Image (cartoon, rainbow, N blue to C red):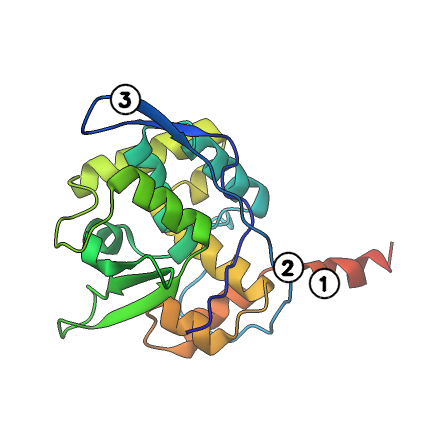
Amino acid sequence: MTRQPVTSDLPTQPFRRRSRARGQVVSCSANHAGASVQALSPAPSAMSLHTAQGRRKYLTPDERARFIATASRQPPETLTLCLILAYTGCRISEALALTHADLDQAGGIVSLHCLKKRRTGIVRDVPVPEGVMAILDFVHDLEPSERRLWPFKRSTAWQRIKTVMREAGVSASAASPKGLRHAFGVHALRSGVPLTLLQRWLGHASLSTTAIYADVLGAEEREIAARMW
């Protein structure tokens, strides 16, 4: 599968973790190159990227960058959870279900189990940047096993994400794991990822659901609007 990274805001400042073997403090850093921007036409859907009061439910590019930068200053396990949510667009329950065996280091693939499907065993593969996989390996000492990456309860994971959102100054209406999922969808389409591929990555049953992410003002629309000013 061809890897298609969809963002360029991985933390560049070293982060620290404590070695399980000797209690030593070690460091790691990652960088990633960006992708081009492309806006697509929206399609009707029952879902919405805005609340009933018209507030957006997704993080803006600046908020997303601040979120990742803030996450790099959190405990390592919080950082990796934030990166998985931001770079795969998965649901928080899908992230918490991940085991070491679900990460393909060589291929840079995260295999997410679709927990919302009626049938079990449905998996979707999502590519992530090399830097993300390197950080996951560094923090979790990845090995082929069924050991879960994060032994958190959902409520604990939710609170950790909310704390990072608050410190990053993310808008209240977008400050949730779902806000990261929506931000991933918007950013992917703006980066030129085909709608059908994004549908597969997000695990949507209907293409019209995925198409809501195209209904966000993109760079091309702003450029056209600027001609009127």
Q: Residue at x 46, y 39 (%)?
A: 68
Nearer the observer, 35 or 58: 35
Q: Sort mark 2 into few (<14), some (14-19) or many (20+) by Cα contacts within 10 Å.
A: few
**Amino acid bearing label 2:** Leu
As drawn, 110 above or below 82: below
Which residue is denoted by mark 1 in the rendering?
A: 221
Which residue is denoted by mark 3 in the rendering?
A: 24
Which residue is denoted by mark 2 in the rendering?
A: 217
Q: Are marks 2 and 1 in contact (CB under 8 Å)?
A: yes
Q: Residue at x 53, y 41 (%)?
A: 65
The local secondary structure at tag 1 comes to: helix
Q: Position of residue 36 (x, y in %)?
A: 65, 62
Q: Residue at x 44, y 61 (%)?
A: 48
Quadrant of the image containing the N terminus:
bottom left
Q: Which mark is residue 203?
A: none
From the viewer's perspective, tell me whether residue 84 is left or right of residue 13. Answer: left
Q: Can you tell which of label 3 and label 1 is closer to the viewer? A: 3
